Image (cartoon, helix red, strand yellow):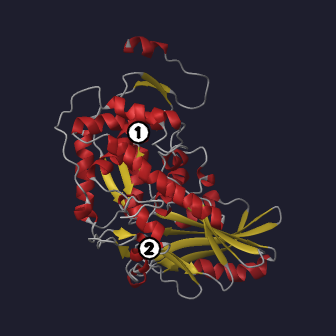
Amino acid sequence: MHRLLLLLCVVIGSSQLVSCAVNPATGGANVVLATSSALDDIGLEMYEQLRQQGAFYDDPEVQAYVSGIGQSLVAVSDMPDATFTFTVIDNPAINAYATPGGYVYVNRGLLAYLDTEDELAGVLAHEIGHVTARHSARQKTARTTSKVLSVTTLILTGSGSLAGAADTYGAQLISGYGREMELEADSLGARYMHKAGYNTDALLEVIGVLKDQERYQRSKAGQTGESIGSYHGLYSTHPKNDKRLQQVIRTASQLEEPEKPLVPRKPIRHFLNGLVFGESIQSKREDNRFYHNKLGFTFMQPEGWTVSTSAENITAADPSGAMSLTVSLSRMPAEQTPEAWLKSRAIGTLTDPKTLEQAGLTGYSAIATANGNHKRLAVINFNGLAYQFEGAGADFSSSDAIIMPIIESFRPIHPTEKQVGQGRRIEFIQVPRGASIASLAAESKLPDAEDQLRLINGLYPDNEP
């Protein structure tokens, strides 16, 4: 039957490489839009960028614990011999992701809201299901350095804005693959949980916990007008009311005998006690400087200027909007100099060339003129990445006198600037008899303490201990 399915796979006219592959999880044939090795390369590149940028949560015990649960699920999956890498990301956003090549990431912020090992297994099993079902290969995936960088930036920042990553793997990674593929990942995840000895009902429970978090964020966004991000596997309805989701998960656990006996539900408090909650480091922002803690750089921010960040770039602008400086990232080949890099990409005639040497970094700058318009261009090599600067203004001469010093002020964040203050940490306590959320919140320094304590303890929106 599989052979017949392979024969029926055809290539529809397209400039994109299309092939057909057997899905290891379902046994069916899928048309895929990228080769397995190409996708694995994307996953490895993302992993290395996240590692180099210090995105991994610095707690070996927590990392080993999460990895151990993940590997036990892989062992009973449809790809037991594949290499999977499980990593906790130092990010307060509530999400988890799987990238090609078997790289599974869980944000530290998600761990804070879990109660049992079964729930953590449910999160990991869902992500493993995305990998074994080859969801990334079945989507339109473009392998360009800029888009890979956009994905890692989304992971680092937890940005809920996906406009800059539309039609890329990043949008699917953060917001989900769509109803059918998310259900398939839940079905496969439930099967892996069952075979590994975990209670599959925990998958419904953890989705409920995450849905409560989304409801809370939506409520706060309604008050402030801000957009929200949400866990990528969530649906529009609560799992208590989602009959199809319940059926998919419970059916999967009835198909076969577990390979391991069902283990009693194990709290994970001993691993979460002391876990950083919220922002891990309070940014030290000296007067007139912008700091990007995750990427590790800083530059001068003139008085009155605003700096905004997105998945694609960072933009600094003066109060009037008459001048601006945009910073974006791409990979710089090791054999290429900043001068050669800039000249190969600049449009127009280049004048006023400058070699940049600042804080141990090298770069190059020039003014590009095209159709009578002038722009200040620069590139600085930092951690193997090309930081590209593009400045412009209504009065270019006056603007350049301000923009060029900003570029020249770009440098790595000093170690003393990185470690300023400690974030909050989770501590488990025995609640006194008769205590209420209101009384506990009165002693807490958390912002919006009542709602946060309910969310952390599974009591949202109005339950009591």
Asked which quadrant contains residue 81, the reply is top left
Q: Is residue 37 visible?
A: no
| Of 244 and 154, the residue lying toward us | 244
Which residue is the site of mark 2?
438
Q: Which residue is drawn at 52% across and 28% down?
A: 18
Q: Residue at x 21, y 33 (%)?
A: 258
Give the left or right position of residue 191, taking residue 270 as reference: right
Q: Is residue 280 visible?
A: yes
The crowding category of the residue bearing disc 2, from other C-alpha atoms within 10 Å (few below 14, some 14 to 19, many at least 20), is some
Which residue is the site of mark 1?
130
Asked which quadrant contains residue 379, the reply is bottom right
Q: Which residue is drawn at 81% across and 74% down?
A: 394
Whole-percent x and y of residue 261? 16, 38
For badge 1, the amino acid type reads His
Whole-percent x and y of residue 146? 55, 53
The tag earlier along the polypeptide, 1 or 2, is 1
Whole-percent x and y of residue 239? 46, 43
| Of 12 and 207, the residue lying toward us | 207
What label sits on residue 269 in the rendered view?
none
Q: Specify the farthest residue to the left.
A: 261
Q: Residue at x 64, y 62 (%)?
A: 222
Whole-percent x and y of residue 317? 70, 74
Whether residue 110 is situated above or below residue 421 in the rendered picture: above
Q: Specify the farthest residue to the right.
A: 372
Query: Which secondary structure, mark 2?
Result: helix
Query: Which secondary structure, mark 1?
Result: helix
